[in-house]
Amino acid sequence: MEAASLIPPGYRDASAAVLMGEGGDAPRGIPGLVYFKTSGSTGEPKWVGLSRHALQVSAAAVNRHLAVDASSVWALALPLEHVGGFGVVLRALEAGCGAERFERKWSGPEFTSWLGAVRATHLSLVPTQVHDLAAAGLRAPASLRAVVVGGGCRPPADGRAARELGWPVLASYGMTEAGSQIATQGLELLELPYSPEPLDLLPCWEARSGPSGRIEIRGELLFCGLLRHGGSGWGFEEREGDWFVTADTGTVEGRQVRIAGRADARVKILGELVDPAVVLAEIVAASAGGIGGRELAVVAVDDVRAGKRLVLVHEDSVSPDLIERTLTTYHSCCPGFRRITATVPVGRIPRSPLGKPLASELSRIAADAVN
């Protein structure tokens, strides 16, 4: 497949605004940027505007970091309208190498067979996809040289299981506002046991841990501004300042980054800050391999006395006995303010197309069940 065939109309016109994934003309009067719609797991929808130069520099930086050359083949298994998917296309163009797009409904076995047939060497996946491949025991095709995993938390157990099956997974940290990757593990780590951290900053980025503990980033690849649609129509907000304060907490040591979690996900319980994602990871660890991270979610709901309290939402496929045993183990060593106060079974954990848990929907489910 020619990567150029996946470039949307208007992209080559440097003065044209392009709204990825949207048909028709872009709103009049907005800067000639490439816009990607994003809302993450929380917050109002917004369009992040990136320059074509930033997207191209990002593609080149990723290619150099992963030793992509003209003989490589990038495989696309992410939505093209997301910056991670579109970035794959630009990387193939920048390297002058092959590009193949998986156009069928996601299926681990079918995807693995397809990868081998197209002799893919590089691809980007979200943690959900890695989980599916590892859980199915699917072995990676011999052609693969690197699999970049982004899009949220990277459960170490899934990464280790994937490595044992030959998948050369490398953790990464990125966001739409940065045009894709900010920090990505190096190929040399494929010789070591898998760990999701630390992550190496790409040369085009600077990072620091700010006063609030949030990661701050700076570089020429940063987004130019945000496009929002309100009651009075479209409005563009230009980014201010050189440094961008992300919603992620963590530490920066030299050129390495460690991500602790999302600052906007933390809640106060009895005056103590708690990150539900960290609690979820501890519960999964307490199950000793009995429960996967995709089958659970930890949600904070309002509580008159404590401010918030934690509720465990779990899929019906997990037995109540296993949930009870796991929580007994978890509660035996956690402080009182981090205890799970109720459990709520659901058919499936609601997720976005990229596999991220939908926080607002989970909060509604949990609140309706316990109030």
Image: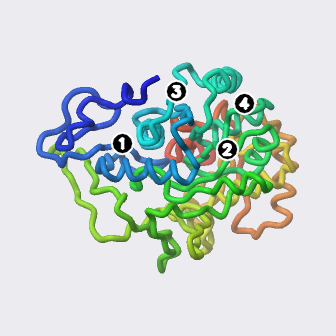
Residue for badge 4:
141
Q: Circle 2 is placed at which residue position?
A: 313
Q: CA distance from mark 3 to mark 1?
A: 24 Å
Q: Nearer the viewer, mark 1 or mark 4?
A: 4
**Residue marked by disc 3:** 100
* Picture quadrant of residue 173: bottom right
Vertical position of residue 50 compared to residue 261: above or below: above
Mark drawn on residue 37: 1
Kind of residue indicated by mark 1: Lys
- Amino acid, disc 3: Glu
- What amino acid is at disc 2? Val
Mark whose residue sits in front, 4 or 2: 4
Residue 116 in view in this figure = yes
Q: Whole-percent x and y of residue 93?
A: 41, 37
Q: Amino acid at mark 4?
A: Pro
Left or right of residue 333: residue 226? left
Say which label, 4 or 3, has the lower sequence index.
Answer: 3
Q: Are there few (<14), some (14-19), or many (20+) residues within 10 Å of tag 3?
A: many
Q: Secondary structure at mark 4?
A: loop
